[in-house]
Amino acid sequence: MQIIARGRAERHTVFMPEHLRTRHWDSVMAVLEGVNARLAWPAAGWKIGAAAKEIQEAEGVPEPMPGRLSQRGIYASPAVLPRDLFINYRCSECEFAFRLGADLPPRPAPYTEAEVAETIVALMPALEIGDTVFADWYGASNYLGSTMDNGGAAAFVYGPPLADWRQFDLPNAKIDLYLNGQHIKSGFGRAAMGHPLTSLTWMANWLRRRGQMLRAGDFVSTGTCTGHFFAAPGDHLEVDYGPIGKISVHYA
């Protein structure tokens, strides 16, 4: 975890020695939490990676993977993201995000979707951008490198918040991604565990089991609805969420 934390803090790539590599899930989660503890960056919420079953199978993980959103990577749309925010790549994922208005503290019993829904103060269109410190980032997938590296969380861009979020049919809400004015791909809200609220509830219970919690004011980005798109410096992304809003991001 020290190697990863140093790479994040000093903005450079790292190489994971063979003897430190593991695919043991509990060990990977321990590294993830240890990296965040070492960095101690002011937190702004959480992101959920591999929310879709097919992505979990492709990446060889047994469940979704969380990542801490830090205040230093939070931007409101329209946003210009500086080049030095990223180390390796800009994995752009179109998602639905929620903001919470109340804490969900640890307790013995799991939280239900109805309970979690009562804490939501806003729905927003969002773009979660992944990155990693690993120089051999593609090969690092063999030892779940991105998962250890805070789930790849690097930046988060959010659109206008909507308080009356229950009016929307989120599983069937369509998202269209445009690169430099050209349509690239589409997706639907159901890609995030069938419903973004299901994904949010998973996050609340993942933390609950560890004696941690979602807090009032937290952003939670619920998982990609459009898969992965690797943007490049100079690219301009527009994302259309229909009646839910739009997002504009330029990569410097």
Image (cartoon, grey):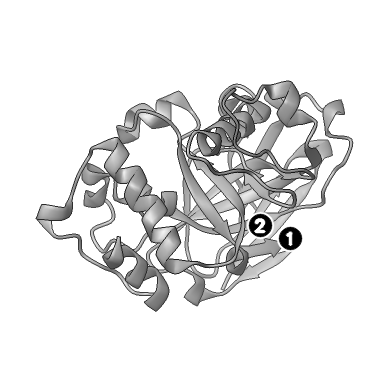
Image height check: is 73 above or below 49? below
Please report the residue visible at 21 percent of the width from the left and 43 percent of the height from the top.
142
Bin the neighbour count of mark 1 within 10 Å (Cα to Cα): few under 14, some 14-19, many 20 and up: some
Quarter-of-image position of residue 240:
top right
The residue beneath circle 2 is 157
The residue beneath circle 1 is 77
**Mark 1 in CB contact with mark 2 (< 8 angstroms):** yes
Q: Position of residue 208 (x, y in %)?
A: 55, 35
Q: Is residue 60 visible?
A: yes
Q: Position of residue 195 (x, y in %)?
A: 65, 25
Give the amino acid type for the residue marked by disc 1 in the picture: Ser
Please report the residue visible at 43 percent of the width from the left and 49 percent of the height from the top.
151
Q: Nearer the viewer, residue 119 or 198?
A: 119
Please report the residue visible at 48 percent of the width from the left and 76 percent of the height from the top.
84
Quarter-of-image position of residue 42:
bottom right
Bin the neighbour count of mark 2 within 10 Å (Cα to Cα): few under 14, some 14-19, many 20 and up: many
Left or right: 133 with respect to 110? left
Q: Quadrant of the C terminus?
A: bottom right
Q: Is residue 180 visible?
A: no
